[in-house]
């Protein structure tokens, strides 16, 4: 197997397992947030956006997004408002309570990752960090 094939196999194996681990952490009893809700809060943390923009960025329909958005509005974590220039457009904004909830979940995820890395040597941490920077460079820029 070539280096390229080995890398592809490892990425295809490891990434879904890591995502599953993070998803399980978010859904756990001490967090209790669905991955879809986490994604919405995380996206709104970076900038307010319309329902259409949110759905488009997540590759889903507005109808699919609607139930999650309504639940987050009920919890007081996001706010819906009509666009002043276009009344058909619904804008979404993260509330202070939503920001606090997002930060809580991020801290809990941070702690879970830290537990996984607690016994890693400095050399292992350097290798992991360098590998992640390389993945970011190749796939996310």
Image (spheres, grey):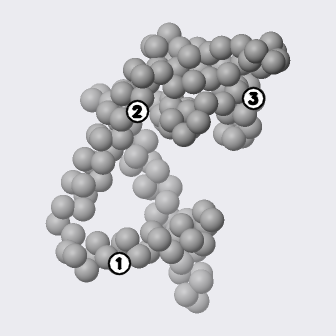
Query: Foreground: 13 or 36?
Result: 36
Marking on residue 52: 3
Q: Secondary structure at mark 3?
A: helix
Label 3 – label 2 distance at C-alpha: 22 Å
Q: Quadrant of the C terminus?
A: bottom right
Reply above or below: 6 against 118: below
Can you tell which quarter of the image residue 64 is in? top right
- Please say if 3 is above or below 63: below
In this rendering, the answer to whether 113 lies above or below 104 is: below
Residue 129's x, y, as percent? 37, 71
Seen at 21% across and 70% down, the residue is 120
Q: Earlier in the sequence, mark 3 or mark 1?
A: 3
Q: Which is more toward the observer, 26 or 108?
A: 108
**Is the residue 125 above or below the residue 91 in the image?**
below
Q: Residue at x 49, y 60 (%)?
A: 15
> CA gap, disc 3 to disc 1?
40 Å
Q: Quadrant of residue 5?
A: bottom right
Q: Residue furthest front?
A: 85
Q: Residue at x 29, y 40 (%)?
A: 108
Q: Are marks 3 and 1 in contact (CB under 8 Å)?
A: no
Which mark identifies residue 45? none
Dot 3: few (<14), some (14–19), or many (≥20) neighbours within 10 Å?
some
Q: Nearer the viewer, residue 43 or 59?
A: 43
- Res. 37 visible in picture: yes
Looking at the rendering, which quadrant does residue 119 occupy?
A: bottom left
Q: Which residue is mark 1?
A: 127
Q: Which residue is mark 2?
A: 102
Q: In x, y percent, where is residue 75?
A: 45, 13
Sequence-first tag of 2 and 1: 2
Q: CA distance from mark 2 to mark 1?
A: 29 Å
């Amino acid at each position: 197997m070539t280096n390229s094939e080995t890398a592809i196999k490892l990425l295809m194996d490891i990434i879904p397992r890591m995502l599953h681990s993070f998803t399980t952490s978010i859904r756990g009893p001490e967090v209790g947030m669905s991955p879809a809700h986490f994604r919405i809060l995380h996206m709104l943390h970076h900038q307010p956006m319309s329902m259409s923009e949110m759905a488009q960025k997540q590759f889903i329909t507005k109808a699919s997004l609607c139930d999650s958005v309504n639940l987050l509005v009920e919890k007081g974590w996001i706010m819906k408002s009509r666009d002043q220039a276009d009344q058909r457009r619904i804008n979404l904004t993260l509330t202070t309570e939503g920001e606090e909830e997002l930060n809580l979940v991020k801290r809990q995820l941070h702690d879970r990752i830290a537990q996984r890395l607690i016994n890693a040597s400095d050399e292992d941490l350097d290798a992991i960090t360098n590998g992640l920077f390389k993945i970011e460079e190749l796939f996310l820029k």
